[in-house]
Amino acid sequence: MAVDVLKRIPVREQDPKVRATNFEEVCYGYNQEEAMNEASRCIGCKQDKAKCITGCPVNINIPGFIAEVKEGNFEAAFKVIGESSALPAICGRVCPQESQCEGKCIRGLKGEPVSIGKLERFVADWAKENGIKPVPADSMNGKKVAVIGSGPAGLTCAGDLAKLGYDVTIFEALHKAGGVLSYGIPEFRLPKDAVVAKEIENVKSLGVKIETNVIIGKSVTIDELLEDEGFEAVFIGSGAGLPMFMNIPGENANGVFSANEYLTRNNLMKAFRDDYATPIARGKKVAVVGGGNVAMDAARTALRLGAEVHVIYRRSEEELPARKEEVHHAKEEGIIFDLLTNPTEILVDENGWVKGIKCIKMELGEPDASGRRRPVAVEGSDFEIEVDTVIMSLGTSPNPLISSTTIGLDTNKRKCIVANEDNGQTSKTAVFAGGDAVTGAATVILAMGAGKAAAKGIHEFLSNK
């Protein structure tokens, strides 16, 4: 088949009407022929000049792995990716490639950029199907490192340190490893057993141990890990799981949820499955307040649970922070977008349950600190939407438990841990941090980049100790 180098090879997806009724993965990914054809579109920039590499927070040798895919050398491609990333099957699915590696792709200057994320996913899935595992360290150095949190930052940091010969133990507060990968991202975007669990097994195959149901700050403190448990360094990758609310009237009504709780019930605790007893609100009309990826996840989950769903966002579509792909999928599936709209009150019936949401129309004024135009209320434009469930998706901040139980660990005004961006070093000796615990809620790949930087920082610290 002749390949038009200016156009991407289309990726197969479930029909929108079908997928809106199930939790199976939306995107089917490439087969071998499609992957090799897409790889042939890459112009093969030299590694020291490839802008796609600089656009990747973990600096994968993208031209290198794509060159191997082009020739059908999929195991070699997996090894190239594995030098930089511990979670390629996850990143290939949920990274915002359009604003990172693909956004810098030279092919995209004339034509469409190479589908780097879909190729990464193909390679990782091929390796999984063919039993290819990452290569562990030749020998151990006898030094113990504790990692707090088994999300993308923690798994990346642990994997990189294990490859360097460290004895690494991850402590996870929940009963299942994965962090936001397990509780936050829905099955239809990121399958838990087929993808997340397999990636975690790959990290464990490097020698990393994972202890679940350990709450750092309650079960054991960081000081106890360092002083009593024999760990020589600690990495904090505990994420940002504390939800934010609007503080508007009616927000404490029955039927109001944080997106965190709603998605955790569905994703981690499998409320969507008939063989699980996890309760979840199956509203008939649901309002999701917010415009990020988490809002899209909550909205598309509610739709699959049988609801008519409204996404309420105070800016225009151009300012939606969610990935364009997720917005596109949501629209295809029938999600209603009420843009330039802001809630002012949640309406409550005599029994304390949500019966509607009062909103006001907005218009865009001058740009604010984020660079986006500030939404301004249009006087006299109040209106109501009849709903029985409201899901607040307004961002998250770190849980203060770790910082409040660790002497000498500095935080900023947002309760985020203060850490050096280059090496993860915090104000406390031998304690490093990265990911959402430092930045507040961000992306999987940025958390991985922070975990990678911290692993390098810990290695330098312990090598010079």
Image: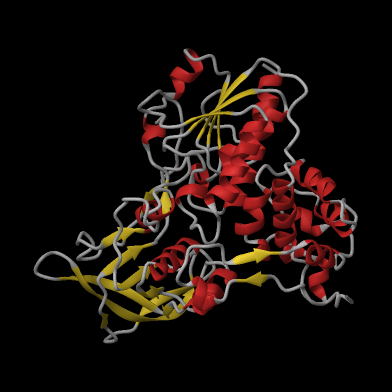
Instruction: Please name the residue shown 42% across and 27% down the image.
Output: 406
What quarter of the picture does the C terminus occupy? top right
Q: Residue at x 46, y 39 (%)?
A: 176
Counting from the top left corner in percent of width and height, residue 312 is at 38, 74
Q: Is residue 165 left or right of residue 409?
A: right
The count of marks equals 0
Relative horizontal placement of residue 311, taking residue 71 as reference (left or right): left
Apparent side of residue 355 relative to residue 283 in the rendered image (left or right) = left
Q: Nearer the viewer, residue 429 or 243?
A: 243
Q: Residue 272 at what x, y percent from top left?
A: 39, 58
Can residue 73 be seen here? Answer: yes
Query: Do we see residue 420 in this rendering?
Result: no
Q: Is residue 376 left or right of residue 101?
A: left
Q: Residue furthest bottom?
A: 380
Quadrant the N terminus occupies: bottom right
Position of residue 307 measured from the top left corner of the image (x, y, whole percent):
35, 73
Dividing the picture into quadrants, the one containing residue 362 is bottom left
* Residue reaching furthest to the left: 350
Measured as percent of width and height from the top left, residue 140 is found at 71, 18
Residue visible at 77% across and 40% down in the picture: 83
Above or below for 154 versus 247? above
368 over 205 or under it: above or below: below
Residue lying furthest front: 275
Vertical side of 365 occupied by 62: above or below = above
Q: Quadrant of residue 351?
A: bottom left
Q: Residue at x 49, y 42 (%)?
A: 437
Is 382 situated above or below 222?
below
